[in-house]
Image (spheres, coloured by chain):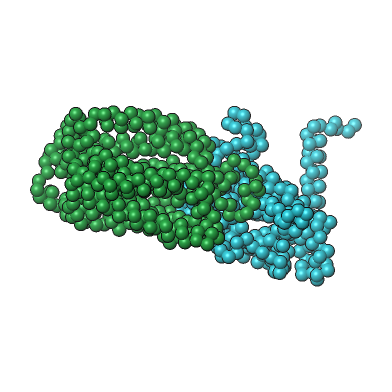
Amino acid sequence: MSNPVTRADVLRGTAAAAATAFVAIEAIRNSVTARAAEAPTAPDARSYRKEIRWPKNKVGLLERMHADLERALKKPVEERHWSMAIDRRKCVGCDACTVSCIAENKLPPEVVYRPVIKEEIGTYPNVSYRFTPRPCMQCDNPPCTPVCPVNATWKRPDGVVAINYDRCIGCRYCITACPYNARTFDFGENYTGDQNTRQPYEEAPSFEYGQRRVREDDASPVGNARKCTFCLHRVHVGMLPSCVTTCIGGATYFGDVSDPKSLIAELAGRPNVTRLKEELGTKPSVFYLD
Amino acid sequence: MSLFAKNQQLRRVLYVLWIVIAAVGAWGLWQRAETGHRLANYGSYVPWGLWVAAYIFFIGLSAGAFLLSALVFGFGFNKLERLAPYALLTALATLFMALFSIFLDLGHPFRAVNVFLHPNFGSMMTWMVWLYTAYFILIIAESVLAFRPLLANQQEGLRGMIAKLIGSANGYTDEQRERDESRLKILGRLGIPLAISFHGGVGALFATVVARPYWHSALYPILFLTGALVSGGALMLAVALIFGDDMDPAGEAIQMLRKIVVGLLAFDLLLEWAEYSIPMWYNIGPEAALMKEVLFGHYWYVFWVFHFGLGAIIPLILFMRAPKSAPALITGGLLTALTYMAVRLNLVVPALIEPQLKGLENAYIRSRLVFEYFPSAMEWSVLAGITALGAALWYVGYRLVLNRERMA
């Protein structure tokens, strides 16, 4: 007579099956990314146009950016330079990136890292819209960092401009110094009022800069300047920034621009590249394709 | 006897005024402590508002008053000798008001110590903080030396305690006087470049911000310094006539100060003409639009009514047409000094009301992501609280050190 199956056996069996499935998925994923990494990365114009077509080829492009990312992560941090490209011809102004950024970073009301500017161009009947998503430009010559009186914001070796929430005194000088209005101040407001009525989603921790922070009254980042980090906490574990993965038009690209094989480096060399307020000499790491 | 001691009605008016301001201020300070920045109207696009303007206003009054005292202590400018202790006390009280304003404006006020622990000397703000800390120490040292003879032989009460603390409770010899005067001379001389650098530095804090064309002007530090001297000098004119002992409005000290204030006010207007007329002349460019907004926009009256009318033209008429009338000089002095807040607001806020990128105002609509600003009731009340505290500090100093006579 066979032994009766206990609940523990069922749980063990389920766990084993889940682990096997996980390993299998990871193996497939790795093989895909490895193939993508080995794939020719400087396609001719025809294949490039084919590849860049979105969303038909969205998965392919995401895979390529993933492969670029994993390759970059193998390099020392000072040899990477994270950069973002936004194709304004493809952006449909859906605000999905704005919303996903808010969800990813658990942003309170009044704090926004990536609004989408909507401009109406022309007069009826010749009217069009232009959409400009505006993350932090992660300038190579940032005007916001040298003004900080306490060295609480600085340019990381990988190109991202970071903030030390525990050192920032909340003087907001950096906010005035940014020529893109890309920094906002956390006033300590919540979506549902005071602590008693707060909803679970407001208690969920944020992982900005790889630090786990649950929102509390008067504790940082409340009272601090805040800004887009290119989702460094995701990037460091091999995930693309949330605005890239949620872009329904496939208009946002991300990667290590110092890697000549990367998609972002290819895009950076195109003739239709523009940067916002280039005349200021801030050298933004975000560029637009027009 | 001072006008304040002689005139009971004036005292009553000032006491009632102080009580009202203090009551409003107490509510504001309590709200600030309870709710942080949540009741403030500044936001992320206009991140600096009333308290930053108040900070540069008070620090300007302090630098202006201090520079007057330094002329006496440092360079033996005897015509203003009688005003010097009042100027020093005013500089101290207004410095406290300035520091308290900016302390309350910080997101994490108690982290202000980080400016000393982790300073970034590339930032103008760091220089400003370090320089006004040095200025604060210098003002305390000067006060000790200047107030010693005034509290000589005081043994009892709070006055006695202060006398003991500053070392004149057991008398004050001529030898000590001589030594203190030479020390005051050194400190006064040191204080002049210090006050000029820190207040010029406050102007440079704004002027060095390339992202804001409205601020990014080499004239800004000069404007700040002139403004400090105008507002501080005008305040001292009123303070001396109200609180000074037997201060003769036709006397040398007051007349000299009147002339200084008139000259500086005229120079300030000239600088302002340059600051506005050059970017606006061809009515083109980002600065021209902002300046047009200041002069003819929603808050036109801040410039025309408060600054130009009440703060410059009316005082100039009073100073020129009734040069020896105490009421005219007091009114002119108070008007110039107090309405200088309008100038400070117009220095800070307009630079922030223009979106850095066209269309950003409609990109993500929230109440703190707007390019407009008018201070909230809490902000005004906090300013009232700071004013009441500063006035109280000044009055305590005045009664303890400068004027111990019985009131009529």
**Quadrant of image for the N terminus of chain B:** top left
Q: Quadrant of residue A41?
A: bottom right
Q: Chain B appears in which tint?
A: green
Residue ID at (21%, 40%): B244
Q: Nearer the viewer, residue A198 or B275?
A: B275
- Where residue A101 appears, x then y in whole percent? 67, 47
Q: Which chain is cyan?
A: A
Residue B132 visible from this viewpoint? no
Q: Residue furthest front?
A: B321
Name the foreground residue: A36 vs A119. Answer: A119
x then y, percent, for residue B348? 46, 50
Note whether A114 is above or below B216 in the view shown. above
* Residue at 54% from the left image edge and 59% from the top image edge: B283
Q: Between residues B320 and B184, which one lies in front from this camera angle? A: B320
Rendered residue at 50%/37% (across/down): B376
Quadrant of the image containing the C terminus of chain B: top left
Residue A219 x/y as whole percent: 53, 40
Q: In this rendering, is residue A260 above or below A253? A: below
Image location of residue A138, percent across then percent down: 60, 58
Say which residue appears at 66% left-offset and 37% top-offset: A201
Which residue, as the protein is rendered here, is positioned at the far right? A1
